[in-house]
Image: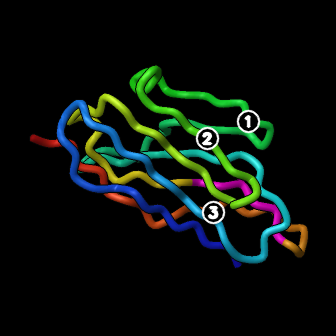
Amino acid sequence: QVQLVESGGGLVQPGGSLRLSCVASGSILSIGALGWYRQAPGKERELVATISSGGRTTYVDFVKGRFTISRDNAKNTVYLQMNSLKPEDTAVYYCNAQVIVRTLSELEVWGQGTLVTVSS
């Protein structure tokens, strides 16, 4: 019914920047909160940042001041601008959305992930 597709991952040197995008498609009536999560090798998935339908943002401490989450409601898209990247930011990044579909059901949807590798 609803798909999330991430893009923008890749290999970047320490101190570099990447911008991740996540586009939602399908039988969408509205999108509520959006979030970015990440999972490093051998570790559990962890929250990175969230943005409410009204644009309120939250960040975990280890990305504050370096990452910025934003959304374009007209495009059903959420972004994650990542600056000053560190090797420890290496992970698969996933987007998450709370979606109201046209049948008025609320779904939690995950993307397939995009790999970010920070290495010299």
Q: Are marks 3 and 2 in contact (CB under 8 Å)?
A: no
Neighbour class for label 1 at 10 Å: few (<14), some, many (≥20)?
some
Image height of 84 relative to 33, above or below: above
Please tell me whether residue 99 belongs to the stretch shown in magenta.
yes
Secondary structure beneath dot 1 equals: loop
| Left or right, 101 with reference to 15 | right
Sequence-wise, the earlier of marks 3 and 2 is: 2
Q: Which residues are magenta?
A: 96-101
Q: CA distance from mark 3 to mark 1?
A: 19 Å
Name the foreground residue: 74 vs 32. Answer: 74
When the figure is inspected, residue 2 is found, relative to residue 61, above or below; the finding is: below
Nearest to N terminus: mark 3 or mark 1: 1
Q: Which residue is mark 2?
A: 70
Between disc 3 and disc 1, the foreground one is 1
**Where residue 10 sits in the image (x, y, percent)?**
27, 56
Sequence-wise, the earlier of marks 2 and 1 is: 1
Which quarter of the rendering shows the N terminus? bottom right
Q: Position of residue 31 (x, y in %)?
A: 77, 56
**Dominant SS in magenta:** strand
Point 65% across, 55% down: residue: 97
**Disc number placed over residue 55 in the picture, else none:** 1
Which class describes the residues within 10 Å of circle 3: few (<14), some (14-19), or many (20+)?
A: some
Name the amino acid type tagged 2: Ser
